[in-house]
Image: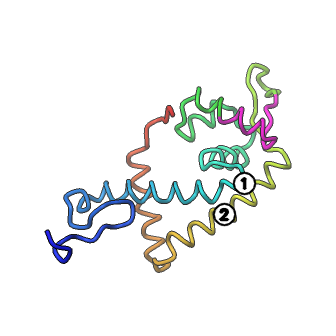
Amino acid sequence: MSGADEAPTAPGGTVPGSTLWGNTGFRLIKLGEMVLATTEAAFAPLGMSPRQYNVLATAASLSSPSQQELSRRLGIDPNVMVGVIDELERQGVVERRRNPADRRRYIVAPTERGRELLRESARVVEEVEARVFGGLSDDERALLHEVAGRLLEEHPPPVKSH
């Protein structure tokens, strides 16, 4: 095949015109992989992963969340959640406190350092989103956001065990 006959290769190694390129689900997988990799790279200087950010932000947004509640809400296997919270605790961004209503349970609460890190991380997320979705109009971005949310509500992701 000559160079003129070859399909151009898109970012991420996909080839427009291939069978998979025509599959919306595959495109969304590749888009998700690209957004995840971009976010991981942007969070690296903060010592934060996207999963840790999700757990920290969710813990900060809830009133007295337990590890189990965070696990259920975020679809993260409880055993994995323990490790994520252990690491956040080692970094000094969350602390486990006894739940006064149930001494067997712990509340996961952001520390002052955790709240500072959340503010820094939120700015990073805004920058990543501006870079990734900057080529879309405001209406296109709003539509993508709405459709993605609707599909995730209709088909909740499985609990992640890794």
Q: Is residue 27 above or below residue 102?
A: below
Label 2: which residue?
Answer: 124
Highlighted magenta segment, given as a residue range: 84-97
99 vs 5, left or right, is right
**Could you say where residue 108 lies in the image, as x and y percent from the top left?**
75, 36
Total number of numbered discs in the rendering? 2
Q: Please say whether residue 89 is one of the residues in the magenta stretch.
A: yes
The colour scheme of the drawn protein is rainbow
Q: Is residue 101 above or below residue 143?
A: above
- Assess disc 2: are there few (<14), some (14-19) or many (≥20) residues with their C-alpha within 10 Å of its C-alpha: some
Question: Which corner quadrant of the image does residue 144 belong to?
Answer: bottom left
**Could you say where residue 129 lies in the image, as x and y percent from the top left?**
56, 67
**Could you say where residue 122 lies in the image, as x and y percent from the top left?**
68, 61
Furthest residue toward top: 104
Residue shown at the point (81%, 27%) measured from the top left: 98
The Cα atoms of the two marked residues, 2 and 1, are separated by 10 Å
Q: Please say whether residue 71 is one of the residues in the magenta stretch.
A: no
Which amino acid, by three-letter code, is at mark 2?
A: Val
Q: Secondary structure at mark 2?
A: helix
Label 1: which residue?
Answer: 46
Asked if the residue under mark 1 is in contact with the one under mark 2, i.e. CB atoms within 8 Å, the reply is: yes
Which of the pair 31/112 is nearer the observer?
31
Instruction: Classify the position of the N terminus by image quarter.
Output: bottom left
- Assess disc 1: are there few (<14), some (14-19) or many (≥20) residues with their C-alpha within 10 Å of its C-alpha: few
Which amino acid, by three-letter code, is at mark 1?
A: Leu
Q: Is residue 136 above or below residue 97?
A: below
Question: Which corner quadrant of the image does residue 118 belong to?
Answer: bottom right
**Could you say where residue 107 lies in the image, as x and y percent from the top left?**
76, 33
